[in-house]
Amino acid sequence: MDAADLTMPGDSAAADGRVLVSLDGVSKRFANGTLALSAMSLDIREGEFVSLLGPSGCGKSTALRLIAGLGAPSAGTIRWPGAREGTRGATEGEVGFVFQEPTLMPWATVFKNVWLPLRLKGLSRTAARDRVMEALAMVGLDRFADAYPRELSGGMKMRVSIARALVTRPKLLLMDEPFAALDEITRIKLNDDLLRLWQGQNWTIVFVTHSVFESVYLSSRIVVMAARPGRVIEEVAVDVPYPRGNEYRMSTPYNEHCRTVSDALMRAIMVAAEQR
Amino acid sequence: MTQIELQTGAAAEDEAAIAEARRTDPGRIRALAARIAVPVVAFGAFIALWQWYVVAYQVPRYILPAPTEVAATMVGDWPILSSALAVTLTITFAALAAALVGGVALAILFIQSRWLELAFYPYAVVLQVTPIVAIAPLIIIYAPSTESVLLICAFIVAFFPILSNMTQGLKSTDHNLLNLFELYGASRWQSLWHLRIPASLPYFATGLRIGGGLALIGSVVAEFAAGSAGAQSGLAFRILEAGRRLNVPRLFAALILITLTGLAIFALTSLVSHLLLRRWHESAIRREN
């Protein structure tokens, strides 16, 4: 089955944007022989909020890492139309990455953690100060610049991690199940904050999740993936205009989309089970 | 330290909570006082009992000298003992310094190149597992002076725990953080300096504490094995000499100096480790729950 054949033309709200990154038949086979991702084709357009949704082992994190330039695809190409070529392909300075864990350096203060991407590019503390504080202000943590990560709650650590990803002002924000380890209340709050930030800036977000509800709430487009081998099964456009708030969570369109996406996810799980 | 949950608008409270958690409270000071007072009183009682026993049963000084006599010897023999102490201290700290530099540098080389590690790690293990007393005669043949024999022996003993801890520490860096550094185009040097070395500090601290103690043991054992005489004699030689002459009070005095040296090294390395880790590492932070 060729995943590319199933790709529907994206007709979401932001689909008229320029293609930012384009995956063409991308596969990834690990050294131990596992085919983590098989022939994935996907165009990410500017301004989109795309979720990759699927069960464990469906290659969603692998796809995200490949987009970030962490490891090379075994087959297929990842193109960045219109991006300047850096030393590590086109991703340099264009991509911010948020891991499932906050992934902060415990020995460094919040300020130093957020400063890191700029520091690695050679910006001194004073030169980076304004941008670091701006990024911290965006996530509401500018008063915690001198705190150490261990003094913060899980949700606050995640905010620091997001601020660090934002400090380079990336075009594309890649998020690998960033809120999966947080409690429901904190997650809902961070979802709202993320949407607010996304709307306020000219960003594109690719968001990996295994939560149907989270993906329907956040995304303009959902890519449903299946496991063994990881591949794209279906794409669902969520054509509900932003801003989305609590009313949207209670609305009929939200429930309908959740049902559609749940069904797609069930099909993805069935397809994978048949092939075992 | 308390976990703080963020509620926007309540940030000031959170800051107050952080300040609260950082403050030292009187209860902790009282607990600290007890921790010092109890062992001091117990020690005083032990010394008094010792003194009473020696006096009451008229134990001869070549079997067990009274604490007062050990103290008198410490003062009377101070010129001999202090120069021996100086030699032991010099050897110990020179060996520890060399082991720190060598261990850390070799560990950094090891993580830069798997080949280097494969080639050289076995020798480090061989040096570690072979008892130093057994290697000492060979070192005596090759080394130019007694002092260098002691130095080499103490170095070999202190080197391995620092190397192995540091190598382990440099390898134990959070994989996601390494990915993050790669993502932001960090050079090898930047990853080493900003990530691998700070992440390995807890392991370094362990290596330092073990290595510090072993450097002293190494220098003492080496002196037993190598022997020495005259101005270059360390405390170990003075102990051997006093033992042969049945000068037991001086033996005790020298032994006390070695013990105090060991304690001082332990305190010093613990302090260094605390200063390195106090703000962020789990091991250095007090929790209440």
Image (cartoon, rainbow, N blue to C red):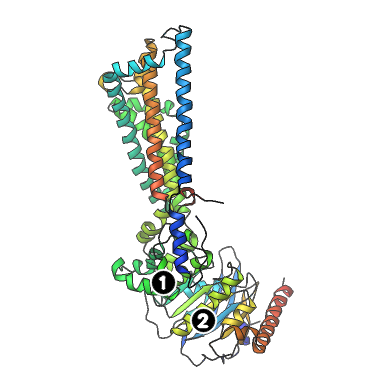
Is the same chain shared between marks 1 and 2? yes
- Residue B26 is situated, as x and y percent measured from the top left of the image, at 45, 46
At label 2, the amino acid type is Leu
What residue is at 40 percent from the left and 25 percent from the top? B221
- The image quarter containing residue B272 is top left
Can the viewer see residue B160?
no
Residue at 44% across / 9% down in the picture? Answer: B55
- Residue located at (55% from left, 64% from top): A31
Q: Position of residue A66 (x, y in %)?
A: 50, 73
- Residue A215 visible in the current orientation: yes
Point out which mark residue A195 bears: 2
Please tell me which residue lies in front, B137 or A134.
A134
The three-letter code of the residue at mark 1 reads Leu
Above or below, comparing residue B90 to residue A229 in the picture: above
Taking the image as shown, residue A74 lies to the left or right of residue A252, namely left
Up-down relation of residue A253 to residue A275 (above or below): below
The answer to whether A217 appears left or right of B105 in the picture is right
* Disc 1 residue crowd, few under 14, some 14–19, many 20+, Cα 10 Å: many
Judging depth in this view, the residue of A101 and B34 nearest the camera is: B34
Q: Secondary structure at mark 1?
A: helix
Label at residue A151? none
Q: Position of residue B20 (x, y in %)?
A: 45, 56
Badge 2 marks a residue whose secondary structure is: helix
Could you tell me which chain the residue with mark 1 belongs to? A
Q: Which residue is mark 1?
A: A136
Label 2 CA crowd tier, 10 Å (few <14, some 14–19, many 20+): some
Tell me the chain of label 2.
Answer: A
